[in-house]
Image (cartoon, rainbow, N blue to C red):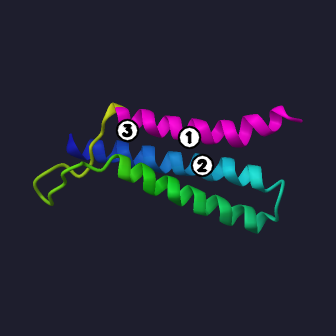
Amino acid sequence: MENMDKIVVLIIVFVSAFITWKVIKDFYITKFHKVYAHLIAVITSSFMLLSTMFLFAPKNYQRGQTAEVDLSFTSIVSVIAMVAVIYILFKYIPSKNK
Protein backbone atom coordinates (compact mmCIF):
# COMPACT_ATOMS: atom_id res chain seq x y z
CA MET A 1 0.00 0.00 0.00
CA GLU A 2 2.89 2.34 0.68
CA ASN A 3 4.13 1.97 -2.89
CA MET A 4 0.66 2.84 -4.18
CA ASP A 5 0.85 6.19 -2.38
CA LYS A 6 4.19 6.89 -4.04
CA ILE A 7 2.80 6.05 -7.48
CA VAL A 8 -0.26 8.26 -6.99
CA VAL A 9 1.90 11.17 -5.80
CA LEU A 10 4.28 10.78 -8.76
CA ILE A 11 1.39 10.77 -11.20
CA ILE A 12 -0.13 13.88 -9.60
CA VAL A 13 3.23 15.70 -9.59
CA PHE A 14 4.09 14.88 -13.20
CA VAL A 15 0.61 15.62 -14.55
CA SER A 16 0.48 19.00 -12.81
CA ALA A 17 3.94 19.90 -14.13
CA PHE A 18 2.98 18.81 -17.67
CA ILE A 19 -0.27 20.80 -17.63
CA THR A 20 1.61 23.84 -16.37
CA TRP A 21 4.24 23.45 -19.10
CA LYS A 22 1.60 23.09 -21.82
CA VAL A 23 -0.51 26.06 -20.72
CA ILE A 24 2.48 28.38 -20.26
CA LYS A 25 4.06 27.34 -23.58
CA ASP A 26 0.82 27.85 -25.49
CA PHE A 27 0.40 31.29 -23.94
CA TYR A 28 3.92 32.57 -24.57
CA ILE A 29 4.37 31.04 -28.02
CA THR A 30 2.02 33.72 -29.37
CA LYS A 31 4.12 36.49 -27.80
CA PHE A 32 7.76 35.32 -28.09
CA HIS A 33 9.89 33.04 -30.23
CA LYS A 34 9.12 29.35 -29.64
CA VAL A 35 12.52 28.72 -27.99
CA TYR A 36 11.95 31.47 -25.42
CA ALA A 37 8.40 30.30 -24.85
CA HIS A 38 9.65 26.78 -24.24
CA LEU A 39 12.34 27.96 -21.81
CA ILE A 40 9.83 29.99 -19.81
CA ALA A 41 7.48 27.00 -19.74
CA VAL A 42 10.21 24.61 -18.61
CA ILE A 43 11.28 26.92 -15.78
CA THR A 44 7.69 27.44 -14.64
CA SER A 45 6.87 23.74 -14.76
CA SER A 46 10.05 22.96 -12.81
CA PHE A 47 8.86 25.24 -10.04
CA MET A 48 5.46 23.53 -10.16
CA LEU A 49 7.17 20.14 -9.92
CA LEU A 50 9.18 21.20 -6.88
CA SER A 51 6.28 22.87 -5.11
CA THR A 52 4.01 19.88 -5.56
CA MET A 53 6.75 17.54 -4.34
CA PHE A 54 7.12 19.66 -1.22
CA LEU A 55 3.36 19.55 -0.65
CA PHE A 56 3.46 15.77 -0.38
CA ALA A 57 6.57 15.60 1.80
CA PRO A 58 5.90 14.51 5.40
CA LYS A 59 6.40 17.16 8.06
CA ASN A 60 8.67 15.13 10.38
CA TYR A 61 10.48 12.86 7.96
CA GLN A 62 13.01 10.42 9.40
CA ARG A 63 14.80 8.19 6.95
CA GLY A 64 13.66 4.59 7.17
CA GLN A 65 11.14 5.20 9.97
CA THR A 66 8.37 7.30 8.45
CA ALA A 67 6.59 7.22 5.12
CA GLU A 68 8.32 8.98 2.25
CA VAL A 69 5.16 10.69 1.02
CA ASP A 70 2.14 12.03 2.81
CA LEU A 71 -0.89 11.65 0.56
CA SER A 72 -3.54 13.94 2.02
CA PHE A 73 -6.73 15.52 0.79
CA THR A 74 -5.50 19.07 1.44
CA SER A 75 -2.37 18.50 -0.64
CA ILE A 76 -4.40 17.17 -3.56
CA VAL A 77 -6.82 20.11 -3.33
CA SER A 78 -3.87 22.54 -3.20
CA VAL A 79 -2.37 21.07 -6.37
CA ILE A 80 -5.71 21.21 -8.17
CA ALA A 81 -6.17 24.82 -7.06
CA MET A 82 -2.69 25.83 -8.26
CA VAL A 83 -3.20 24.23 -11.68
CA ALA A 84 -6.69 25.74 -11.96
CA VAL A 85 -5.39 29.24 -11.22
CA ILE A 86 -2.63 28.87 -13.82
CA TYR A 87 -5.13 27.56 -16.36
CA ILE A 88 -7.56 30.42 -15.71
CA LEU A 89 -4.86 33.11 -15.79
CA PHE A 90 -3.13 31.88 -18.94
CA LYS A 91 -5.90 30.22 -20.94
CA TYR A 92 -9.28 31.66 -20.10
CA ILE A 93 -8.72 35.33 -19.24
CA PRO A 94 -6.53 36.26 -22.29
CA SER A 95 -9.02 34.65 -24.71
CA LYS A 96 -11.87 36.49 -22.98
CA ASN A 97 -10.33 39.87 -23.86
CA LYS A 98 -10.23 39.19 -27.62
Q: Are marks 2 and 1 in contact (CB under 8 Å)?
A: yes
Provide the residue designation for mark 3.
75
Image: 29 above or below 74: below
Disc 2, SS: helix
The CA distance from mark 3 to mark 2 is 17 Å
Residue 61 position in % (x across, y down): 19, 54
Q: Is residue 97 left or right of residue 17?
A: right
Q: Is residue 42 left or right of residue 76?
A: right
Number of numbered labels in the structure image: 3
Image: 45 above or below 39: above
What's the residue at 58%, 35% (across, down)?
84
Residue 94 position in % (x across, y down): 79, 39
Q: Are marks 1 and 3 in contact (CB under 8 Å)?
A: no
Kindly give the residue lying farthest to the right in the view shown: 98
Disc 1, SS: helix
Q: Is residue 4 magenta?
A: no
For the residues carrying marks 3 and 2, which lies nearer the camera in this image?
3
Q: Is residue 50 left or right of residue 93?
A: left
Question: Magenta span covers which residues?
Answer: 74-98
Provide the residue designation for mark 1.
83
Query: Which label was assigned to residue 20?
Result: 2
